[in-house]
Every structure is written in structure tokens, then in C-alpha cells.
Amino acid sequence: MTTPPWPQKPSTAADAADRYEQSEHAAASGDSAIWISRFSQAQRQEKLNGLGKASSQSLYGLSFAVKDNIDVKGLLTTAACPAYGYMPGKDAPVVRRLMEAGALPLGKSNLDQFATGLVGVRSPYGIPENPYHADYVPGGSSSGSAVAVAREQVDFSLGTDTAGSGRVPAGFNNLVGLKPSRGLLSTRGVVPACRSLDCVSIFTRTAAQARSVFEVAAAYDPLDPWSRRERTQRSINAMPVIGVPRSSQLDFSKNAEYARLFAQACERMSALGWQIKEVDISSFVECAELLYEGPWVAERTTAIEAFLLEQPDSLHPVTRGIIEGGFQGTAVDFFKARYRLEELRRECSAMWEDCDVLLTPTTPTHYTVAEVEADPVACNSHLGLYTNWMNLLDLCAIALPSGFTEAEMPFGITLQAPALFDEMLLQLGEQYLGEQAAAPLHSEDWVSLAVCGAHLEGLPLNYQLSERGAKLSRKVKSAPAYQFIALTGEIAKPGMIRLAEGGVSVDMEIWDMPLEQFGSFVNLIPAPLGIGTVELEDGGSVKGFVCEAIAAQGAEDISHFGSWRAYLDR
């Protein structure tokens, strides 16, 4: 269940260039079916030059792949259909945010055509080879994105997820797959599958990696009608209650190894102090059936209707058969299904009154390429048994690697929760994978504190946090409402002053500290600093360092840096 370590952030531009170069060499020498297109050496250098050289950038020096239904300026967007290809005029906002944080896209990765499939074999560009056994499917539809990370050709990748495309490939490639709450990552610049359900997903090798990418990628997009303004990251009790399907409802397709590994996953969670509770998932399963057996197929048809009618022979035969099925329904069918969905939502919501998280296998089994080609629709449908209900019910999820079969094939589990519990799932993922101690999660015995200067990780006063048992929770930005100044003293530190108008966003870290230690920490804080309420970029607020306005007189204004690390690196 161990995963490769997250690469350390380079300290210099030269180190970053070396990292980008290593990724490019790995991609060039790997399975070509992973990629649909890649930047040339000259294009890559142009992109690299545009990233800047600020080592304070949170993703500085990291490379990533982009599923080829997401726009990247300079490369065709094909959705794995050459006749559909177009040249976008700009990057999708989610890609642009990652680049602004220092990450370099190497190219566009392969997928099941028009993101229709969970198998990874429906592409004219070939089948990305499963790195653990070439006979087995890589999973889809984000096949190339997952395999590129699994083969360490990139540090992370973007996929999309409508029915499980951000989770199934993670399970088959020993990866973490984060399917965020719908609307937290902009879907502008994404070729839609089901526009009302689509999510941009993230593939990484650890849960901590997923957190780092998610914190950059998630942002409200006022030009995306499906974007979610609400960003409150809800929390749970210290020892979560994990709902597990009743044994009679667990389907492993006679895969005894999957059954054994799932039981081991439950045992590990119990050992962490998490409470396991059997639940009825029959309403979830019925909801899943609506996605492909109900009128939501018509939303896929709507997405490419004109192209489908003009060039039907350009589509993969299986893909065409599925998408053309959307023409068969009626408006009456839609409303009947919509009413039933709302009834199922109500039935499913009752489970969250007793459980914090629902645990399932990511998939019931793992098919070979030959098995899928022999019965493409049935195999694909069965792989979505535990994934298809997710977006219809507005849930978030994280797929986690959870051991290997005796044949050395990876097995994965998925934790899922209601929308806006993304942060909680990331914390649970880190704990389950052993990436951090099983500390309480935001209970009444802990307090969250935002720091912006000498208390940042690795800086001179950070020991005041660590010696009190504080844990780094996440990296955030303040609201653009502060003046940032440099204070003089024995230890250099900054001050944040709230302005009535204007101001900048400031990079901060949020640390969770035992409440019993908080008073002694506050007693260490000298004037003109103090602890107050800091407004965050996402609209929330947190306790954090603030500064008296009088301190600005004669102090150096460093607002244009927006970061204490950037100021120190000047």
C-alpha cells in the first residue's frame, strides 16, 4: 500500500528545468498510446519560460498530463476522435491555474472516445498499456492520464469524471484519484460528456499530492455556469463512522482476492480507530442504474449532436452505439427519471445521518482487454457498479490504493461523502495511506490557525507550532484585502493589515493545534502582532495573525510579493 514519494519542490530554476526535462524524457520513451499529442522541445521551452522562476510557487518544478478533452493552448483537443479535433485559443482555466503555480503540461493524454467508457480501450490512438499487466485494461475513460502518472512520466495528471473516469483508472493503476465536488474545479474548456454532471479529476501517487493540486485547481469561475461559489470544507468528528455495504450487497464477480483485500481495508480502518457500520446501499445502486439506463444518456448526445449527425462514421462503434441511444428517449422519460432521482436522493441522504463516509471497492473486479472486447457494454457497465451514482447524488470521492492481489495486480477502495467534504476525504486518505499520524480531524479539541511568516513550515519560528503538536492542514490564500509589510526585529517577520478598500491576497498555511496548547502559543506573540480573524480567498475565514495598522508607519510595504517566502527569495 506504499506509494512513491512526492518529489521535493526544486529550490532553483535550474533544478526545476532538470525535473521538467526528466519528465519529458520519461514520456518520450514510454508507451506511445498514453499520449495523443505532446509539446515539441521548442513549445515546451516556451511554456517553461512563461512559468516564471519563483520557487515559492506551490507546484514549481512539477509536470502534468492533461486528458485530451480539456483545452491546452497549442495542442489540438480531439476527445480521441481525430475528425472532431480543434485548436483551442486558450488554456482551460483549470490548466492555467496549475501553470501559474509552476506546473508544466507535457501534452494531451489518451482516453475512451468522448469520455464514454470506464475501460480505456475505446480510442483510435491505441490502448495505454496497464503497467502491472499488459493483458488487463488500464481503466477509463481517463486511461492515458492515469498510466502516465503510474509510469512516472509525469508528477500528476488531470482527468474528467462523469461516471467513474477519475476513480476506476486510479484503482487499476495503484493511484490516488480525487473526484472533487461538482463545480469546485472549472469545467470551462472541457468537451462535455454530461455537462450537468462532469467533474475535472486529479490523479496522483499520494493523497498529499492530490491535496497540493486540488488547493491550486479549485476556484470559482464566474464564466462557468456550473461553477460552485460555495467553498466551505465541512469537517467531521475525530473518529469517523465509515459506512460499508452489507455483505449481501457486495459484488466482487467471484474475485476472491478483491473480497480479501476489501476485508483487509476494513480491518485497517478499524485499527485506526474508525468505526465500521454496515449500511444498505440499494438506493445508491438504483440511482447508478439511471445514469446509462435512463435519459441522462441524452445529455451525451446533446454534447456532440451536430457532429454525430454529420460524421457518424467518425466515432468508435461502441461509443457511437451508446451516444446514439440518447435519441430514443422522450421528455416524459426524463421527468419520470428526474422525479425518481429526487426520491432516491432523499433515501440515500438518510445514510449520512449515521455515517460520515461511505466505503466501497473502487470496482468489483478487473477485466482483461480480451474480456472487454468480447462483451464491451456489459463489462463496462459492471465496472461502474460502485461509481455511477456519485455525480447524480452530488457526492465527492477519493479512490485510494489498497494492496495487491497474489498475482501482483493493484486493488483500490473509494471513500465518498456529500458535496464539500473534499478536505475531510483528503485527510482520511492521508491517514489511511500512512502519510500522517491519525490525529483528530477538526474536533472541538483542536483549533485551526493561519500563519503567513516566520511560522511557515521550515522557517525559524515554526518550532513553536510543532512542539505544541500542531499539524500542517493545507495551504491557502487570504482574501485580496490586506496590506503586507515587513517588520524589523531579532527575527524577521511580516504583518497583515486589513484595509477598508483594495489590498492583496497573501499566501498562508493553516495549522491545526490542540486547543489546550493554544493559550501558551498566543502568549508568545509580541505587539504589533496578534491573533484575529483572517478572511480567505474562497470566502471563508479562520483565526490567524493580524497586525496593528500603526505598524505600517515606516515599515517596508511588500504587498507586491504576496508571499513571505517570495520576499525572502528576492
Image (cartoon, rainbow, N blue to C red):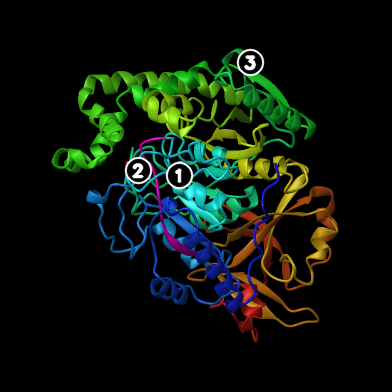
- Residue extending furthest top? 248
Quarter residue 43 falls in = bottom left
Mark nearer the N terminus (3 vs 1): 1
Query: Which amino acid lies under the numbered mark 3 shown in the image of this protein?
Result: Ser
Residue placed under numbered mark 1 in the picture: 143
Where disc 1 sits, the SS reads helix
Q: Are marks 1 and 2 in contact (CB under 8 Å)?
A: yes
Mark nearer the N terminus (2 vs 3): 2
- First to last magenta residue range: 104-117
Q: Is residue 525 left or right of residue 34?
A: right
Front position in the image: 312 or 180: 312
Disc 1: CA contacts within 10 A as few (<14), some (14-19) or many (>=20): many
Mark 1 and mark 2: Cα distance apart in space: 10 Å
Q: Is residue 122 left or right of residue 501?
A: left
Where disc 3 sits, the SS reads helix
| Closer mark to the observer between disc 3 and disc 1 | 1
Query: Which amino acid lies under the numbered mark 1 shown in the image of this protein?
Result: Ser
Q: Quadrant of the N terminus?
A: top right
| Closer mark to the observer between disc 2 and disc 3 | 2
| Closer mark to the observer between disc 1 and disc 2 | 2
Query: Which amino acid lies under the numbered mark 2 shown in the image of this protein?
Result: Ser
Where's residue 518, x and y in %?
A: 80, 54
Residue placed under numbered mark 2 in the picture: 123
Front position in the image: 103 or 509: 103
Q: Is residue 5 above or below residue 565?
A: above
Where disc 2 sits, the SS reads loop
Disc 3: CA contacts within 10 A as few (<14), some (14-19) or many (>=20): few
Residue at 26 percent across and 50 percent down: it is 82
Where's residue 85, x and y in %?
A: 26, 53
Residue placed under numbered mark 3 in the picture: 247
Mark nearer the N terminus (1 vs 2): 2
Asked whether 261 falls inside the magenta stretch, the response is no
